[in-house]
Image (spheres, rainbow, N blue to C red):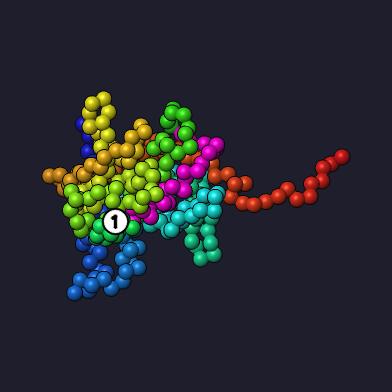
Amino acid sequence: MSNHIFDALLNEKIEFFKSSFTKTSEIYFNEKKKLISPLEYGIHKEYACKEFLKFLIPSKYHLGEGFIINANEEYSTQCDIVIYDSTNTPLIESGNKQRFFPMETVFAIGEVKSSLSKSQLKAAINKLAKAKSLRRDNSNPGIISRKTEDKFDNYNHPFDQIFSFIICQKLNFKVSNLDFDEIYDKDILDQDKHNMILSIEDGLLLYKHTINGKDKIWPFPFSQNKKLKNRYIGKGKNGKNHFLNFAEHLFNFSQFATTFHPTFSKYTIHSEGNILDES
């Protein structure tokens, strides 16, 4: 069973997204296929991704770009896409409009790329992993929303972590030859690894989880205290199977993702100063 209205609208979003990433992007190249405006081309791709993602997540989440920060004076490099709880995220912005997001209210982060070589993929996934790890030291947090009934264990439950993904045009290597243990830096924890990699021309990379004897498509690299093996999903006969799986898993995570309170006193150094009480 399906709803033809929802299905038609989703298909429309997918087709617009694919067209924006491929056909429309041709205006940024000259007749020799050389990129003539890299900055505008990057902005164009990010806009196309955001329009697609807006359809998949609840309206309480907004999409931006910027840096992730925590209360330990750690910060990420700039993320192409930051999905955050708009209701509980303070506007932390520099004079030149660079945006900084406290890790407590960030739902997901993403990178938008064109064609990726194996070395470029390595740089992208390690960048995301380091940004994702900024939520690791989060003991005794104030919880705004948490759907899982499992005991809070600082960082180990997937719903308590930041979701990470890459969207690209194409992977310029054989997926069958890909060994993530080789391309992740040695200090990266399994929990910090990517959730999904969506290649428009190739398919979707995520994970395989076995539950009650049945293999499941899973968007988490580490679940139930187990490191999971990678799984590749092709485009399918309809040419959009990878998009549908990406959409489903991102939407499902948005329903269960934990949101924490960013505690003001943790982010700033202050003293009580002189105190005068009424006698």
Residue 154 in the image: state x and y as whole percent. Answer: 48, 37
Would residue 158 appear left or right of 32 to someone viewing this image?
A: right
Residue 152 in the image: state x and y as whole percent. Answer: 48, 32
Residue furthest front as drawn: 186
Q: Amino acid at mark 1?
A: Leu
Residue 247 in the image: state x and y as whole percent. Answer: 29, 43
Q: Identify the element where label 1 is drawn.
A: helix
Quadrant of the snapshot with the N terminus? top left
Residue furthest top as drawn: 212
Is residue 234 visible in the rendered structure shown here?
yes
Q: Is residue 116 magenta?
A: no
Q: Nearer the viewer, residue 185 or 207?
A: 185
Q: Nearer the viewer, residue 11 or 260?
A: 260
Span colored in magenta: 124-146
> Relative to residue 47, is residue 26 depicted above or below?
below
> Relative to residue 147, is residue 106 depicted above or below?
below
Which residue is at a point 25% across and 64% down the rendered structure image? 25
Q: Label 1 belongs to which residue?
A: 121
Would residue 99 appear left or right of 41 to someone viewing this image?
A: right
Is residue 48 visible in the rendered structure shown here?
no
Which residue is at a point 34% across and 38% down the rendered structure image? 222
